[in-house]
Image (cartoon, rainbow, N blue to C red):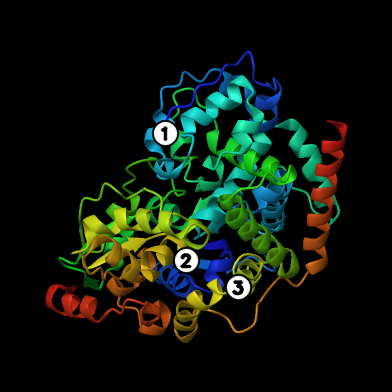
């Protein structure tokens, strides 16, 4: 199955490891991500502060272009997912908005009326492909690897399209299918601070400390969002000094764990791009995993 | 947090304020002040008015007090309040509308200085390339706030670059004129709407 893929800006920079492993994991399941040609930034959390209409029109350009390739679009970034989904939700609520969007997109010869289906890669994997098919593809069970599933905010909020808004389970099920041991994690949808890490560092460090404190001893935290990944990974020294204890936890993407379980080669998973290092993870894997 | 008392008969009230900042004015007016939003908010502890109190200010039309609050600048867009509100109030959307209004009215404040300048740097970067490019975003942001902050960010940037996580040149959109047209037309329609009001 071929899917129109909207990577988003992070996936070609700080989250290039997510991009590589997402493409590879899906390929291993006989799927293919076809990148939307000449896509643009979804506006993230910034467009809405400059202009509400712009926060609709920027993602709508991508949706209008994707419409020419099929009836659905897949994304791997939580902020992109929210913004694309939000276009549909707001067009359905607000008739006046459609008229304004027509004027803006008309400037570039495009039209969009809210009919595309917006999908999250995690959603596609657990619903369309299914956890059973994923389990069948596993070549190296991640036996006993203790992982904390961290979903962040926007996977399930505010639209709750494919999972619960507070305690989602889709990634838990997927990781279990890979053979990993998913630890209970009540902070799984608490906010990582987002851009406050740059603008209001103290607050964001507190939030990340709250997230990491209960899972300091796991083998890795698994994320679905590029900004969550970076916030949790890049400031662990500062978080540690706040908590008064050393914090050193690899933060991986769920697609990288899929790749490990599928025995895909390093160039496709880019685990070496991890700032926390993965030596400890690999030594744990060496002890715990079992080849199928 | 010290309690503040207001005598509403002496306050300048703006009765159309809720309409200005809430896409769902009717819903916002039904707020029962239960405080679920505040209890759900990860940054409420650092705010001057809690989310619940801010809704009250909007309800009664205390425009200046609301716009000078630091509350909406600390909103991370996590949507916890929105999803849990028993009245279904889209509070996250209202927080964004308050940011827009505070910028339009040049309201000053330390949080606004950092947060709004970050967003401005971000949107300038996106307008230029069609996509975000972190090095340019951070240079724009720190030069508009505190250039020395850039030095603090350098080790992380270098580490990410060595790991292949920062592209040397921005990829960007090819059809840059389309991005510019979308920016220009959206802002133009916004200005017309503002003018009619």
Q: Position of residue B110 (x, y in %)?
A: 57, 52
At a point 64% along the width and 20% down the height, the residue shown is B11
| Neighbours of disc 2 within 10 Å: few (<14), some (14-19), many (20+) | some
Q: Is residue A176 visible?
A: no
The subunit letter for the residue under badge 3 reads B
Which residue has dot 2 on it? Answer: A31
Residues indicated by labels 2 and 1 sit on the same polypeptide chain: no
Q: Position of residue A126 (x, y in %)?
A: 37, 53
Q: Position of residue A186 (x, y in %)?
A: 26, 46
Query: How far apart are the two marked residues, 1 and 3, measured between alpha carbons?
Result: 35 Å
* Total tally of numbered discs in the picture: 3
At a point 61% along the width and 48% down the height, the residue shown is B109
Mark 3: secondary structure: loop
Judge depth for marks 2 and 1 and give the one in front: 1
Which residue has dot 1 on it? Answer: B38
Which residue has dot 3 on it? Answer: B147
């Amino acid at each position: 199955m071929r899917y129109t893929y909207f990577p988003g800006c992070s996936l070609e920079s700080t989250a290039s490891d997510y991009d590589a492993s997402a493409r590879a994991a899906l390929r291993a399941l006989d799927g293919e991500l076809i990148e939307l040609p000449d896509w643009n930034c979804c506006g993230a959390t910034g467009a809405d502060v400059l202009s509400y209409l712009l926060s609709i029109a920027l993602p709508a350009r991508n949706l209008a272009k994707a419409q020419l390739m099929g009836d659905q679009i897949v994304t791997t970034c939580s902020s992109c997912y929210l913004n694309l989904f939000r276009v549909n939700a707001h067009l359905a609520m607000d008739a006046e908005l459609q008229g304004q969007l027509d004027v803006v997109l008309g400037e570039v010869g495009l039209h969009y009326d809210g009919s595309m289906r917006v999908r999250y890669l995690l959603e596609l994997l657990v619903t369309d492909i299914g956890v059973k098919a994923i389990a069948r593809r596993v070549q190296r069970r991640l036996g006993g690897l203790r992982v904390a599933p961290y979903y962040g905010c926007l996977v399930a909020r505010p639209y709750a399209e494919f999972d619960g808004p507070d305690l989602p389970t889709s990634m838990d099920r997927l990781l279990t299918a890979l053979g990993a041991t998913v630890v209970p994690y009540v902070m799984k949808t608490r906010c990582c601070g987002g851009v406050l890490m740059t603008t209001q560092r103290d607050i964001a460090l507190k939030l990340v400390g709250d997230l990491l404190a209960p899972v300091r001893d796991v083998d890795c935290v698994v994320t679905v969002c590029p900004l969550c990944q970076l916030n949790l990974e890049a400031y662990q020294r500062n978080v540690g000094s706040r908590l008064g204890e050393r914090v050193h936890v690899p933060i991986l993407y769920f697609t990288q764990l899929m790749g490990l379980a599928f025995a895909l080669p390093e160039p496709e998973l880019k685990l070496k791009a991890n700032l926390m290092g993965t030596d400890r993870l690999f030594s744990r894997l060496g002890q715990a995993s079992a080849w199928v | 947090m010290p309690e503040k008392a207001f005598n509403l008969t002496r306050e300048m009230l703006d009765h159309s304020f809720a309409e200005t900042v809430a896409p769902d004015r009717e819903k916002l007016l039904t707020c029962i002040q239960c405080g679920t939003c505040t209890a759900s908010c990860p940054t409420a502890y650092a705010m001057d008015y809690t989310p619940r109190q801010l809704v009250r200010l909007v309800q009664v039309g205390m425009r200046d007090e609301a716009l000078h609050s630091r509350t909406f600048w600390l909103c991370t867009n996590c949507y916890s309040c929105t999803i849990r509100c028993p009245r279904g109030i889209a509070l996250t959307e209202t927080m964004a509308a308050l940011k827009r209004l505070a910028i339009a009215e040049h309201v000053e404040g330390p949080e606004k200085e950092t947060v709004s300048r970050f967003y401005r740097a971000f949107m300038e970067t996106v307008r230029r390339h069609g996509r975000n490019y972190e090095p340019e975003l951070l240079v724009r942001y720190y030069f508009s706030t505190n250039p020395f902050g850039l030095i603090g960010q350098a080790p992380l940037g270098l580490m990410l670059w060595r790991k292949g996580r920062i592209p040397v040149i921005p990829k960007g959109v090819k059809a840059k004129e389309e991005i510019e047209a979308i920016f220009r037309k959206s802002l133009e329609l916004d200005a017309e709407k503002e003018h009619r009001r």
